[in-house]
Image (spheres, rainbow, N blue to C red):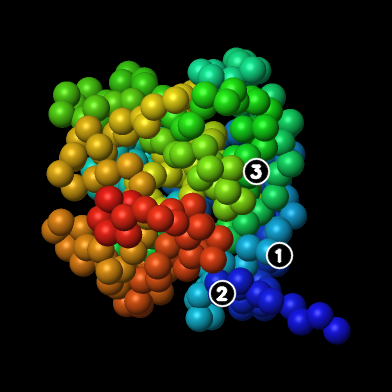
Amino acid sequence: MTPIIRPDWWLPESAATDESIYRNRRDILKALGIGSLGAGLALSGGLPAGADTSDLYPVDRNPSYAATLNGRPMTSYEIATTYNNYYEFGTSKKVSANAQKLTTEPWPIEIGGLVNNPMMLDFEDLVRKMPLEERVYRLRCVEAWSMVVPWSGFPLRELVKMADPTSDAKYVRLTSFLRPDEARQQYRSRWPFPYVEGLELAEATNDLAFMVTGLYGEPLPKQNGAPMRLTVPWKYGFKHNKGITRIDFVAEKPTTFWMTAGPAEYGFFANVNPEVPHRRWSQATERDIGRRGQQMETQLYNGYAAQVASLYTGRDSGRDIFF
């Protein structure tokens, strides 16, 4: 019999929080007369966006992505939706109230650049074209805190396939919204909004790269990046831009938000590495905010080295591909 070889980040489904715990939460709220759309309002201080796609959730969990580490449980819904970096709405973690001012319906998304199929479509039309699933991923912030989140969404490579990039396309540039009348922090002249991030095309088509449209079996709340955000779990969280409105395929490496705002501290790749410190603090350990800040050792590529290390073979293994 051929032995089954598991990736080094794999743990059995039993190690993750039981799915029924947060699925049943919705049933309890319905019994109280709150309903599924009111669930986010009751527990996270804001109505989840994407009401027109709420019928799509919950989606089936992909068992290949049980991303707990050493028995680490998933972060609670309440913490994941109230501890958020979102500079468009403020510099503290308590931005959920401000984020509710963002209008997310309709939400046009433009796909262009070096592609054979440029298009403009509404978020709802896009998400209904995609194969949705749930993946449990670790999220590691460059500020040295972390959480474990069950994201709903679709592989970024499916969008790449739909756009059909030309042979000249080497990078994907993702641009977030620019609405200073709704996101007041965008008036701050020292921040180079709109938020722009980028990936090499090979990174964007890696199996782990994921476009997020929901979490914990519900549409994505606004403070978490509704209606659509990126997650690339082997990279620091500042690469995971929120509220994406435009996706371009380009030949040159994009200049990202933090490359402009802090060029001495932030580069393009932002791959997690405990041995490469930020210029102002160590990255060797992290605080799990879902477990009252418990300290734990940081893993190379956030524990996903087996899936992504080959993307960087032959490159300088020092600071260049980490900051």
The N terminus, quarter of image: bottom right
How many residues crowd mark 2 within 10 Å: few (<14), some (14–19), many (20+)?
A: few
The picture places residue 304, in percent across and down from the top left corner, at 50, 64
Query: Disc 1 or 3, which lies upstream in sequence?
Result: 1
Q: Amino acid at mark 3?
A: Phe
How many residues crowd mark 3 within 10 Å: few (<14), some (14–19), many (20+)?
A: many
Which disc, if any, is residue 3? none
Residue 33 visible:
no
Residue at the spot of label 2: 8
Residue 168 visible:
yes
Q: Amino acid at mark 2?
A: Asp
Residue at the spot of label 1: 63
**Label 1 with label 3: CB-CB less than 8 Å:** no
The residues bearing labels 1 and 2 have C-alpha atoms spaced at a distance of 15 Å
How many residues crowd mark 1 within 10 Å: few (<14), some (14–19), many (20+)?
A: some
142 sits to left or right of 78 = left
Residue at the spot of label 3: 154
Image point 39% across, 44% down: which residue? Answer: 239
**Label 3 with label 2: CB-CB less than 8 Å:** no
